[in-house]
Image (tube, rainbow, N blue to C red):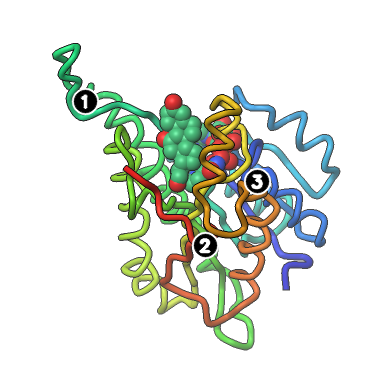
Amino acid sequence: MIKNAVAVVTGGASGLGRATVERLAKQGARVVMADLGSSKGNEVAKELGDNVVFVPVDVTSEKDVTTALETAKDKFGRLDLAVNCAGTATAVRTYNFNKNAAHRLDDFTRVLMVNTVGTFNVIRLSAGLMGTNEPNQDGQRGVIVNTASVAAYDGQIGQAAYSASKAAVVGMTLPIARDLSTQGIRICTIAPGLFNTPMLAALPEKVRTFLAKSIPFPQRLGEPSEYAHLVQAIYENPLMNGETIRIDGALRMQP
Ligand SMILES: NC(=O)C1=CN([C@@H]2O[C@H](COP(=O)(O)OP(=O)(O)OC[C@H]3O[C@@H](n4cnc5c(N)ncnc54)[C@H](O)[C@@H]3O)[C@@H](O)[C@H]2O)C=CC1
Ligand SMILES: C[C@]12CC(=O)[C@H]3[C@@H](CCC4=CC(=O)CC[C@@]43C)[C@@H]1CC[C@@H]2C(=O)C=O
């Protein structure tokens, strides 16, 4: 059960991460909200009360992630759940033939660094701390939830970097589940479709409506609370492990 569990949520100051922090805190969990120093983490944590602590973290930094995990241990005594929501996106064609310009390599690398390397960084360090927990009656010591995207499967034009970064998260899920099984640590990945978050708010209303219409049912953007609901379901269901779950209203993205 989520009550009294201790969680770290990256990207916790906005969108899907924020909804997760809110849901977990409301259900009686204690949460370290890890997000960039430039985010609204401090304000959000204040709104959510004493069971939520903000730690400025860049997920690509070993030092920052270690500090967040030490905060979980020092303030709340343990770590039961790590949720990877931090992410970034870009929309650039592999080669722009009108401008005779190739996709910049540093743009490609930046997206992979945050979405793939950052996610793995949090997984590997969280696993170390979870491994020190006393196992429950099922032998479980902790749970990790990642966030990929349906773009891991049906990436659109301009999403080479983003889709590659998310496909890597899908790809690492099963081998990590196998790696961590000896210590009773589970890991699952969620692949969201189109959700109503600041990432999507950047798009014009017309585009958002068009995108929503492309979803078979329900024909609307997902609410961040629906993502958070799935995080809790994964945490509470002991048999869920090594799998990626789409939450997308049967959406298959067009080119
Ligand atoms: N909104 C959507 O429709 C979808 C979102 N996703 C994924 O879900 C995750 C959350 O996205 P949203 O909540 O929509 O976006 P968002 O932009 O609202 O939140 C992302 C958070 O990640 C943080 N972040 C970015 N780089 C970071 C870094 N290096 N270290 C720590 N924190 C960092 C940002 O400060 C921000 O608070 C992302 O991984 C995104 O790719 C996947 C599919 C659909
Ligand atoms: C994240 C996702 C795919 C994207 O890359 C876009 C994003 C909406 C805002 C954007 C505007 C741009 O001009 C660049 C691309 C992007 C960041 C999309 C929201 C959901 C998409 C996704 O992950 C679907 O699975």
In this rendering, does residue 3 appear at all?
A: yes
Residue 64 seen: no
In three-dimensional space, the C-alpha distance between marks 3 and 1, rounded to whole angstroms, equals: 35 Å
Element type where label 3 sits in the image = helix
As shown in the figure, which amino acid type bears the numbered disc 2?
Ile
Does any atom of ligand 1 lie closer than 8 Å to the CB of label 3? no
Q: Nearer the viewer, mark 3 or mark 1?
A: 1
Quadrant into which the C terminus falls? top left
Q: Residue at x 35, y 52 (%)?
A: 152
Q: Position of residue 187 (x, y in %)?
A: 47, 67
In the rendered structure, are the residues bearing label 2 and label 3 in contact, judged by CB atoms less than 8 Å apart? no
Question: Which label sits in the foreground, 1 or 2?
Answer: 1
- Ligand 2 location (quadrant): top left
* Residue that carries the numbered disc 3 in the rendered image: 71
Q: Which residue is mark 1?
A: 105
**Mark 3 or mark 2, which is nearer the start of the sequence?**
3
